[in-house]
Image (spheres, helix red, strand yellow):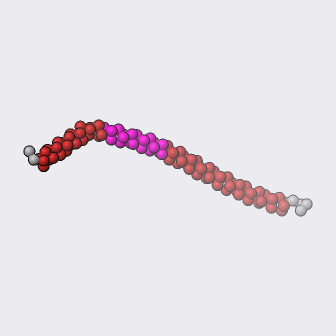
Amino acid sequence: MSTIVIIAIVAGAVILALIAAALATRPRRQEKRRVQARDIRDRAAARETNAKKEQAAAAEKRARAEREHAEAEERARHAERELATAGKDHRRAGRLDPDR
């Protein structure tokens, strides 16, 4: 046989060996990637759950702050009415007081 034929046969055998090795390790690589993808999905789900809890807590805190703000505004309006009524009462008492 000629040298070129021997080199071609050896090269073919090496290529076939590499293909066989790649095919043999493919299931393990795929499983490793599946596990890695599952881990990433699990971490993403945990982060999503935490983010949703934080959003709910923030919404609750915002609602509480809005309620407190509304109560404070109502108290301020009530105080203004009381001050106006007190001012009217002072003026009325001043008009009625004979010593003034």
Residue appearing at x 42%, y 44% in the figure: 44
Residue 65 placed where, x, y %? 59, 50
Q: Is residue 49 magenta?
A: yes
Please name the residue shown 65% across and 52% down the image: 72
Q: Residue 20: x percent and y percent?
A: 20, 39
- Would residue 70 be visible to someone looking at this image? yes
Residue visible at 16% across and 43% down in the picture? 10
From this view, report whether residue 39 is shown above or below residue 78.
above
Res 24 quadrant in image: top left
The residue at 42%/41% (across/down) is 43
From where the camera sits, is residue 45 visible?
Answer: no
Side (left or right) of 61 relative to 8? right
Of 6 and 45, which appears nearest the observer? 6
Judged left or right of residue 55, residue 38 is left
Main SS of the magenta segment? Answer: helix
Of 19 and 75, the residue lying toward us: 19
Q: Position of residue 75 (x, y in %)?
A: 67, 52
Side of 97 relative to 52 (left or right): right
87 w.r.t. 22: above or below: below
The quadrant of the rendering that contains the N terminus is top left
Image spot of residue 91 (x, y percent): 80, 61
Q: Nearer the viewer, residue 40 or 96?
A: 40
Look at the image and say whether residue 93 sits in the magenta stretch.
Answer: no
Q: How many marks?
A: 0
Could you say which is closer to the camera, residue 47 or residue 30?
30
Q: Is 51 left, or right, of 77 in this rendering?
A: left
What are the residue bounds of the magenta stretch?
A: 31-51
Q: Is residue 83 above or below residue 40?
A: below
